[in-house]
Image (tube, rainbow, N blue to C red):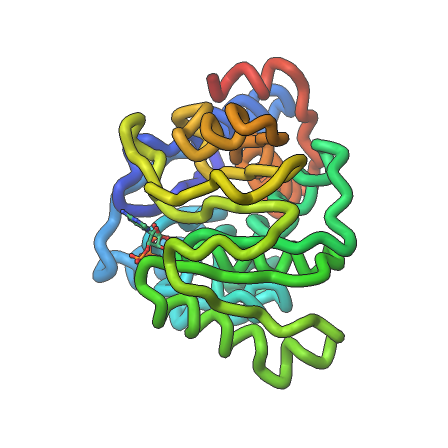
Amino acid sequence: MNKYLVIGNPIEHSLSPLIHNYWIKKNNIKAIYDKKKLSGDDLKDIIIKIRDKNINGVNVTVPFKKEIIPYLDKLTLDAEATQSVNTILLTTGGKIVGHNTDIGGFENAIKDTGYNLSGKKILILGSGGVTASIIFALYNMKVSSITLTNRTKTKAEYLQNFFNSIAAKKNGWNEIKVVEWGEMPEFDMIINTTSVGLNNDDNLNLDFSKIGKNKFFYDVIYNPKETNFLRQGKDLGNKTENGKKMFIFQAAEAFKIWHNIQPEINEEVNNLLD
Ligand code: ATR
């Protein structure tokens, strides 16, 4: 029986086992997908288990998406460009490869909403683990500008420097701007990548009263379904979307990498996560 794992800390709330085991069963695959809470010291052991084929594939979540990188043999271009790995595969050639399926997850989720990002001005709240993947996906979808704002400004500036480096610029991407936390520059779409909202009463305490009309409020968080951020956006008459589809699409891409099967995303899958 092949074994797959999601590793992180905390991990109790992870819905990855639910969705992967659903697809495993649907496709009659002999495998089991489990979750494991780890500390940073355990990463090395997990890699040994993959090399020994005791574990066949691993999803990586907060806070190890970057920390895992030194233990891997190879990164895909996307994982390299974002310094973020959420899916690990042992190739038939025996190499442990780190993939990033958060990028495709976000891209597919936005396409699924029918919103055309081309030429749009984007404001991103937060500069944590998933932010680099979102930036990469936004550039792929040809946005016109990206502004970052984070409570700890230096973390936003780190990402700004990272993406404004020579390597990123050669693709013709516009430079990322950084503004102070609490500032509200003009935008078409605002994306919450902070962890604020995971608890129902969390509030970003930002002033959206002067943002104008017809904006798109996107939250990476999908549990709770409607964060205060999304509720505020909706109450002001804007389009809103939570991170559920992004989660489903990133899982589907990981599933394809491991099993070489494109899993079906149907109503049942959608309802699994409610
Ligand atoms: P990490 O920072 O370890 O990558 P994360 O969960 O991926 O963790 O990211 C947390 C994000 O939520 C960060 O952008 C964080 O801001 P700081 O860099 O200032 O810590 C943001 N965040 C968490 N709590 C916040 C709060 N109360 N107000 C504003 N931003 C908050």
Position of residue 170 measured from the top left corner of the image (x, y, whole percent): 72, 80
Front residue of 239 and 271 = 239
Compared across the picture, whether 234 is left or right of 199 comes to right
Compared across the picture, whether 243 is left or right of 122 comes to left
Identified at 47% across, 45% down, the residue is 192
Position of residue 143 measured from the top left corner of the image (x, y, whole percent): 71, 57
Compared across the picture, whether 82 is left or right of 140 comes to left
Asked whether residue 217 appears in the rendered view, the answer is yes
| Image vertical order of residue 258 relative to residue 265, above or below | below
Q: Quadrant of residue 28?
A: top right
Asked whether residue 52 appears in the rendered view, the answer is no
Q: In the orientation shown, which residue stands out farthest toward the bottom?
A: 166
Front residue of 270 and 213 = 213
Position of residue 67 measured from the top left corner of the image (x, y, whole percent): 35, 64
Position of residue 189 measured from the top left corner of the image (x, y, whole percent): 61, 45
Q: In the orientation shown, which residue stands out farthest toward the front?
A: 210
Q: Quadrant of residue 126?
A: bottom left
| Image vertical order of residue 182 relative to residue 231, above or below | below
Identified at 41% across, 29% down, the residue is 227
Total numbered circles: 0
Q: Quadrant of residue 111?
A: top right
Identified at 47% across, 70% down, the residue is 159
Identified at 71% across, 52% down, the residue is 120
